[in-house]
Every structure is written in structure tokens, then in C-alpha cells.
Image (cartoon, rainbow, N blue to C red):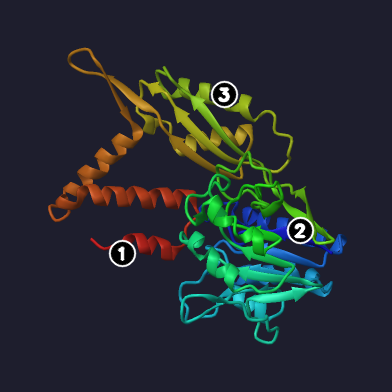
């Protein structure tokens, strides 16, 4: 018996403000296609997807069509794909069927979701292929239970999960992180809260955090594993290993092997422009420092690049605009997507001869504050509206936000 365990695919992710939107969009389908190909080549008994197949619950129809196209070879090979919902998959309008439910009803995945009892417990009903629903499925003697994302109180549910399982040879598919291992800040449980799962389940297939890790019992037995995301989803993941687990089961013992994938190169670089007297001098320094930091790239694919500007300069930071920096970077490495973090400080002289340092963030807040305060009706809420404007600006520049999310920011309670 052997199976493939992956998670956090994030299909549909792209940068909507970028001219290279489609190329980045395809990255996530390419990596899923590679995983499907590997699963067929290894003739696995099943594939596990531990949540966040999609980047958002409200996907585009073309994303659904591409998902079907990518999973079709797995279905044709007769390899079951068992999945649970992650926090990104969840559709908040429960009067509508989710895309995950649709995939399950069409037979491309077996979506596991438990029922709840009147006293707050769990009930893992057998999976029904006719309806595409259920909480438990048995494949070649292994009982697979599924539980999607249940939020920050996941640790409090462990006892009820274990109580609901009465079979042997159990595997749990669970979209949750474990503190000290998971890099995410929400949706985690403590290691001591997770440990009782080891008594009921031989293998706990985790998702949620995009960094791979393996958790062992005090005796040293691996029991909970998170493969991380196979593609780099966000900046901050540039140094994480990327891949999935290929797991074999022999006489009830699980042996895992981490299989690496080939994500698009992602770099976070810093340009220290301290002491620059003018924008031209700063731009020359910028070119030299960035070239030195990206010269080691051997991947022919255009990188995802985050640039951080630091230092005290004698010119207004606005002079070193995004377009000017982008043109310089196009000559150096032609990034597929660019994010600029401008932490430059403007140094001026006061009447007493003392240096006054003002960051770009401070200047932006002051300018926005003056514009908002010009309308007396907004003056009392100046700080709140400035923060809201900057939050919207940051999300739009990242190109990673849906229209509904922007409307949610704009429609916050006063």
C-alpha cells in the first residue's frame, strides 16, 4: 500500500495587477499536473489533498475547468483523490454549493466532511459516491477520516474527534497547523493538544502551513506530517523546501519520503541606499547591489521578486518611483512579479542644524491626513481613514485580493 500526500495547492492564485497574470496563474496548475503524473507513475493507491486546493472559495469558471482537466488523468487511472476543505476553499455563502462539493459530486475528488451531533460531537458517516459526501472512506484496509479547517479552537476538538472513531488502521486528513512547526499565525493547535491523535491515527495528514514538517511522538514515531505547499505561494516562502510526501505502508508501519517539486524562483533582496545624495546616485547603487544578489539564478523562469529599499537619503523617496525601479530590474532579471518595500528615510536639516529623519511611510500618512482633513466631515476620523486607505493600497499593489474583500474593507463599521 502506498499513497501520495499533498496540500495547499492554491489553484487560481495570481497577481491581478500584473501583465504576467496568466503565467503565474498557470504555475499552480503545472505543479498539480506534475503531482498527478507522479501519482500515476508510482501507481499509488490514493492521493490525499489536505486542504486549500483552491486559493479562494469564489473561483473563476476557467479555474474550475482547468482543475477538471488537470485531475482527469487521475480519475482515468482509477486512483481516488481524497480531499478536505482548507480555510481558502471555504465558501461563506452556505446556501450555494462550493466548488469542492461540485468536484466531489462529479467524481474528481472524494470530499470528506464530518457531520455534527446534537451534543457537539463528530459523526464520520461513510462516504457516498452518489452524493459526493461523507466523513469516512475505507481503501484497502485503511480507514481514512477527513476534517477540514475548523479554526483557532482546533485543539479543543481533538478529544471529540478521537471519540468518534472506533475502527483500527486509521488515517486522519486534517487542515490544521501545529505551533512551533507551522509558520502560520492562526488556525494552529499546541503540540500537546495534537498528541492524542497519535493514539487513534497511525498517520495524520496535515495542511495549512506552507513549510514542510514532521511531528513525532515522545518515543520518536512520526505520526503527523505536513508536506507544505508544492509551489511558492507568498513571499516569505523563498527558503522553504517545496514538495509532497510519498508514503508506503508495510505491516501497519508508515514510511514517508519527501519528493521535491520545482517551484518558480522567489527572491527577497535588499538595496541599502544609505548616503545617496540624489536619485541618480541611488539608482546606480541599486543596480549594482541587486545584480550581485540575483546573479546566482540558474532557473530560466522569470523570478518573483521582493525588493526592500533601506537607508537615509538626501532626496525625497518619491523620486525613486516604482516604474523607475521596475525598468532597472527588467534589465537585470526581468521579474515576473515585483513588490517594492520602500523603507527609505529622508534626511533634512532643521534650523538648529540637527538632522531630521522622516520615513516614506510617515510622509505618506501626513499627505493622506492633510487630504482627508480638508473635508471637515472626515476630520474626526482622519487616523482611521488613513489606515484604511493605506491597507487598500497595499492589497491592490500585491494583486492578491478579490473584489469582495476590498468591498469588505470599505464597508467596515464606522
Q: Nearer the viewer, residue 182 or 413?
A: 182
Residue 348 is tagged as none
The picture places residue 161, in percent across and down from the top left corner, at 57, 69
Task: Pinpoint residue 265: horizontal percent, then vertical percent.
Answer: 66, 41
Q: Residue at horizontal 17%, vertical 47%?
A: 373
Residue carrying label 1: 411
Q: Which residue is mark 2?
A: 35
Dot placed on the residue nearer the N-terminal end, 2 or 1: 2
Relative to 337, does residue 402 appear above or below in the rendering?
below
**What residue is pinned by disc 3?**
289
Q: Are marks 3 and 2 in contact (CB under 8 Å)?
A: no
In screen coordinates, is 396 left or right of 87?
A: left
Tell whether 37 sits left or right of 342.
Answer: right
Question: Does dot 1 land on a helix, a strand or a loop?
Answer: loop
> Which of the image's four quarters has the N terminus?
bottom right
- Please identify the quarter of the rendering in which residue 47 is found: bottom right
Q: Nearer the viewer, residue 165 or 235?
A: 165
Amino acid at each position: 500500500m502506498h499513497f501520495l500526500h499533498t496540500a495547499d495547492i492554491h489553484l487560481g492564485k495570481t497577481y491581478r495587477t500584473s501583465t504576467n497574470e496568466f503565467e503565474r496563474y498557470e504555475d499552480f496548475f503545472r505543479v498539480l499536473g506534475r503531482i498527478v503524473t507522479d501519482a500515476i507513475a508510482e501507481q499509488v493507491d490514493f492521493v490525499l489533498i489536505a486542504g486549500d486546493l483552491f486559493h479562494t472559495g469564489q473561483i473563476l469558471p476557467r479555474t474550475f475547468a482547468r482543475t477538471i482537466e488537470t485531475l482527469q488523468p487521475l480519475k482515468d487511472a482509477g486512483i481516488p483523490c481524497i480531499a478536505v476543505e482548507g480555510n481558502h476553499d471555504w465558501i461563506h455563502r452556505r446556501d450555494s454549493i462550493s466548488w469542492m462539493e461540485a468536484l466531489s459530486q462529479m467524481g474528481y475528488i472524494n470530499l470528506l466532511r464530518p457531520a455534527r451531533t446534537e451534543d457537539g460531537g463528530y459523526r464520520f458517516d461513510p462516504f457516498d459516491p452518489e452524493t459526493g459526501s461523507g466523513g469516512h472512506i475505507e481503501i484497502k484496509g485503511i480507514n481514512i477520516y477527513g476534517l477540514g479547517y475548523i479554526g483557532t479552537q482546533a485543539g479543543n476538538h481533538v478529544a471529540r474527534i478521537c471519540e468518534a472513531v472506533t475502527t483500527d488502521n486509521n488515517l486522519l486528513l486534517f487542515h490544521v497547523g501545529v505551533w512551533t512547526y507551522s509558520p502560520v499565525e492562526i488556525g494552529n493547535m499546541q503540540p500537546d493538544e495534537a498528541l492524542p491523535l497519535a493514539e487513534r491515527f497511525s498517520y495524520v495528514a496535515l495542511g495549512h502551513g506552507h513549510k514542510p514538517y514532521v511531528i513525532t511522538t515522545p518515543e520518536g514515531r512520526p505520526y503527523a506530517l505536513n508536506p507544505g505547499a508544492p509551489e511558492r505561494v507568498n513571499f516569505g516562502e523563498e527558503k522553504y523546501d517545496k514538495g509532497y510526501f510519498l508514503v508506503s505502508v508495510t505491516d501497519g508501519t508508515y514510511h514517508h519520503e519527501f519528493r521535491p517539486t520545482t517551484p518558480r524562483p522567489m527572491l527577497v533582496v535588499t538595496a541599502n541606499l544609505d548616503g545617496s545624495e540624489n536619485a541618480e546616485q541611488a539608482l546606480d547603487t541599486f543596480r549594482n547591489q541587486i545584480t550581485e544578489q540575483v546573479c546566482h539564478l540558474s532557473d530560466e523562469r522569470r523570478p518573483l521578486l521582493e525588493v526592500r529599499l533601506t537607508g537615509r537619503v538626501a532626496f525625497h523617496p518619491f523620486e525613486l518611483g516604482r516604474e523607475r525601479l521596475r525598468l532597472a530590474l527588467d534589465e537585470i532579471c526581468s521579474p515576473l512579479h515585483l513588490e517594492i518595500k520602500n523603507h527609505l528615510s529622508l534626511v533634512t536639516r532643521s534650523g538648529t542644524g540637527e538632522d531630521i529623519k522622516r520615513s516614506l511611510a510617515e510622509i505618506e500618512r501626513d499627505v493622506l491626513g492633510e487630504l482627508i482633513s480638508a473635508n471637515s466631515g472626515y476630520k474626526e476620523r482622519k487616523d482611521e481613514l488613513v489606515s484604511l486607505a493605506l491597507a487598500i493600497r497595499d492589497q491592490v499593489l500585491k494583486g492578491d485580493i478579490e473584489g469582495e474583500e476590498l468591498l469588505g474593507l470599505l464597508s467596515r463599521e464606522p
